[in-house]
Every structure is written in C-alpha cells, then in structure tokens.
Image (cartoon, rainbow, N blue to C red):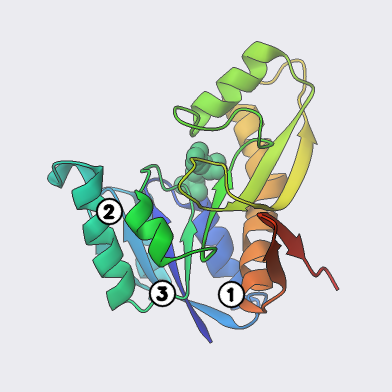
Amino acid sequence: MKNIVVLVSGGGTNLQALIDAEHRGEIKGGHITCVISSRADAYALERAKAAGIKTRVLVRKEYPDIAAYSKAMLEALLEEKADLVVYAGFMTILDEQVCKAFPYKMMNVHPALIPSFCGKGFYGLHVHEAVLAKGVKVSGATVHFVTEECDGGPIILQGTVNVENDDTPETLQHRIMENVEWKLLPKAVSLFCEGRITIKDGKAYVDQQ
Ligand code: GAR
C-alpha cells in the first residue's frame, strides 16, 4: 500500500473526492495517511478529521521564505513516509529541494487546460476570471506531475467542459470541479498507485487498461 499525503490550503473539495473514492475502494494500492495544510483555518482539515485522517499544519507565513518553508515541508513528508504527494488546492509553490526528493511522485490538479491559463498567479478563481475575460469556449482541468517549473510537469489526465455565455467565475469553477477535477484527481492517484503511469522523454504515458 502506498502512503498518500495530501497538501491543502482551502475548502478541500478535491480532498473530499479523494476520501470518498478511497471509501468506495477506487484508490487501488494506496491509502491517504496524512493531510498537511498551509493554513490553520482551512476547512479541508475538518474533512480530514471527520474521515479519521492524521492532520498537520505548516503555516506559510511562519517561515521567512519559500526555502525555509520547503525545508520544513520536506521534513514532514519524509517523516510521513510519503510515497505520493497530492496537491489538492494547495496554493504554495515549493522549491526544488522538494521536487528533487519526490521526482514524479507529486501531482497537482490545476483548474484549466494546461498550457493555457497556468503558471504563477493562476490559481483558484483567478484562473476562471482569466478564461472568461479571454472568451474561450472550452475549459477544464489538468492533473500533472509537479516539477520545478510551475504547472509545467508532465500531464497525466485532462478533461473539458463547455464555457457558457452566462458563466461567472464561480459557476465555471463549480462545473469544472464537479465534472472534471473530482473525477480525474482520484483516477490519477489510483493510476499512480497501481503503477500504470510511466515517464518517457519528459511526458507521462498512462496505461488506461
Ligand atoms: C480547485 O479548483 C483546484 O483545482 C485549484 O483550487 C481549487 C481548490 O479547491 N487549484 C489551483 O488553482 C492550484 N493552482 P478545493 O480546496 O475545494 O479542492
């Protein structure tokens, strides 16, 4: 069984999707062992506690810089013996010391179709605001491996939704979460735990069988 550590910062609906998928037996070969939050008031922590999952809090603002925060996070991940680290609405960028320690063992869900609407500054509702401002007709979400390049690691799974004329950032966010994120993140986690994702020439190949 692989130890899955989930990193969160907010409401934790993606964490809930992972917890529910595990309860339904859909995370094959893995088990959520710890949830680490960058905020003490994240509702995601309540979801973890309700599911009986160990929680830890590492508040970003209590560290002088990203390097010090990343060092503390790396120590926590090693203590938890993480086999897979999942960013589920985790809003802090960790530096290369963490990426190097967990090569192709960290995945993130991003609420847009990478390589569009991604990178620094594109997080949460800001992503959907930018999508609507541009007037694109299709958006979606991407699950990808985390590397040193923000939102630039190998893409594992993507799914789409139509953008409607009367969408607000909130309605679009919810449609993408419900139709794509909450389904694809547990699926990608299970694929990883089953050993069905391989990396070749910097790209991820998924054995969908
Ligand atoms: C999700 O839409 C996730 O894709 C996004 O934040 C939301 C968190 O919701 N993540 C990012 O923007 C990361 N760049 P949740 O806390 O309810 O899972």
Residue 11 horizontal/vertical position (percent): 43, 47
**x 67%, y 42%: residue:** 141
Picture quadrant where residue 204 is located: bottom right
Asked if residue 206 lies left or right of residue 47, the reply is right
Residue 72 horizontal/vertical position (percent): 21, 60
Q: Which residue is mark 1?
A: 22
Q: Is residue 7 visible?
A: yes
Asked if residue 145 lies left or right of residue 50, the reply is right
Quarter in which the C terminus is drawn: bottom right
Which of 20/155 is in front? 155
Q: Tell me the mark number nearer the camera, choosing from 1 and 2.
A: 2
Above or below — where is 202 with respect to 79? above
Q: Tell me the mark number nearer the camera, choosing from 3 and 2.
A: 2
Picture quadrant where residue 159 is located: top right
Furthest residue toward bottom: 1
Q: Is residue 40 visible?
A: no
Tag 1, which secondary structure?
helix
* Marking on residue 57: none
Q: Amino acid at mark 3?
A: Ala
Q: Which residue is mark 3?
A: 82
Residue 170 horizontal/vertical position (percent): 57, 28
Tag 3, which secondary structure?
loop
Q: Earlier in the sequence, mark 3 or mark 2?
A: 2
Tags 3 and 2 touching, CB below 8 Å? no
Which of 121/170 is in front? 121
**x 29%, y 63%: residue:** 74
**x 33%, y 57%: residue:** 97
Furthest residue toward right: 209
What's the CA distance linking mark 1 and mark 2? 28 Å
Q: Which residue is mark 2?
A: 70
